[in-house]
Image: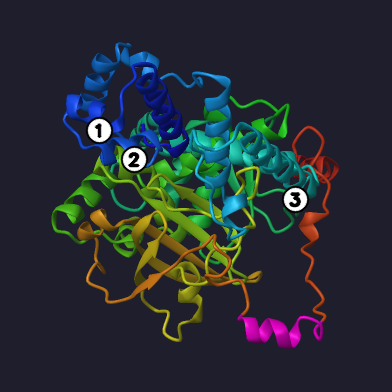
Amino acid sequence: MNDSSDLITLGRRIRHHRKLNGLTLDQLGARVGVVGSQLSLIENGRREPKLSLLQSLATELGVPVPDLLSAEAPDARTALEIELAKAQQAPLYASLGLPTVPASRSLPLETLESLVGLHRELRRRATESIATPEEARRANTENRLAMRLKNNYLPDLEQLAEETLATVGHSSGALTHRSVSLLAENLGFTLIYVDNLPHSARSVTDLENGRIYLPPASIPGGHGLRSMALQAMAHRLLGHQPPQSYAEFLQQRLEINYFAAACLMPRTASVAFLSAAKQRKDLSVEDFRDAFGVTHEAAALRMTNLATSHLDMGVHFLRVGEDGAIYKAYENDGLPLPADVTGAVEGQLVCRKWAARGALGRTNRTTEFYQYTDTPAGTFWCATQTGKTDAGEFSISFGVPFSEAKWFRGRDTQGRVQSTCPDESCCRKPASELAERWSSAAWPSAKLHAHILAPLPSGKFPGVDENEVYQFLEAHSAS
């Protein structure tokens, strides 16, 4: 148990049973071998008790351990206290920069009810204000949280990828374009490169004639085309049917992307490579990228699949645009990602002091940028690389908690900053003298991203112009 919300509930249940037994903090602490101040931290949800201490507490309080671990509040008053404590820990309240009110037993019930009511209304209004209801954002957030519980690791797809690669004799090194073509042939498909692929489709599979159409490229064996071909094959291998909801569409995208990455960077070979690098204390996204002939982003994402399950470490990943907004993000190491009231992180601005934004301001970007960042949730190390597309510049960050930095190249960096976000005074609130000078003398015109107003994709294949696809297939099937 390491979720702060669970710790709050556990702490309140311990306090409830302590009160029922007529014990003070010091009295109960003496019985279980801890000082009262440590027990107070546990009751306030600020410290997680070890299992042995939890068992001792249960024995002294005369309740089973499962009763202490119950997610239910022991009474109505405590339920309000828990709700207030959780609300004050949420990003929405933290962004206001206001002090917290201890949800203690000394707080009058009327005051407690009023505070909880205010937090409920604050959340309702925040939810209402962002409700341009985006099914995709909700589904994407649910997907990210579900993968976090799995440590971003899907063993069934790992196994399928290795079995599929074995059919063409591939086991290590960069997956060649020829091997990808042979995989397609084994499934009864031929890869065909065309320059008039529908704009809304990454690839088109002709099930009737056994063809997978892909866009042309100057380097046919490049990572992009190999990945797109593998994704198209994954639909068939996984038995996907036309999605019935946007959530199902996103789940299918997650699965085909994962399968393609597991083929390009096979588990056995990748874990051997990364484990050897860890033993040398020389882990690096750059080396992993080059060993398997993929992009920096693909290598960093793949390391999030394998790091926790096979290297025993929590990690985080960020793709951030030049405006500081998150495009992709994953963490299971406690990095405090910015999130809106629904839990979505896409589009949220990361702290200006984080390496994900600092790296974009560097003059020399040929090598990774290393940095330690002190946050309210602890200190984190990361390696950041930048890139550029037609849509603008971006950064790719892969990082770990301070305690795991010892395994990585770049751990000796002297770069270290302190971030207090989501406190707006960290990097978003202007200096008082600037605010006083310009607050009534400036009128910026905001840039509106067109996708904000775009309707949700509809039809049999969300986001794809079916008419354009069908016309394309009709034209090519006759050739």
Q: Where is residue 113 in the image (x, y as percent from the top left)?
A: 66, 34
* Position of 176 relative to 467 (above/below): below
Contact between marks 2 and 3 (CB within 8 A): the answer is no
* Position of 476 relative to 430 (above/below): above
**C-alpha distance separating marks 2 and 3:** 54 Å
Which residue is more in the foreground, 77 or 217? Answer: 77
**Amino acid identity at mark 1:** Asp
Does residue 58 appear left or right of residue 361 in this picture?
left
Q: Earlier in the sequence, mark 1 or mark 3?
A: 1
Q: Name the residue under label 1.
A: 26
The crowd level at tag 2 (other Cα within 10 Å; few <14, some 14-19, many 20+) is: some
Q: Name the residue under label 2.
A: 41
Quadrant of the drawing holding the C terminus:
top right
Res. 109 visible in picture: yes
Q: Position of residue 333 (x, y in %)?
A: 37, 47
**Amino acid identity at mark 2:** Leu
Q: What stretch is highlighted in magenta?
A: 431-442
**C-alpha distance separating marks 2 and 1:** 13 Å
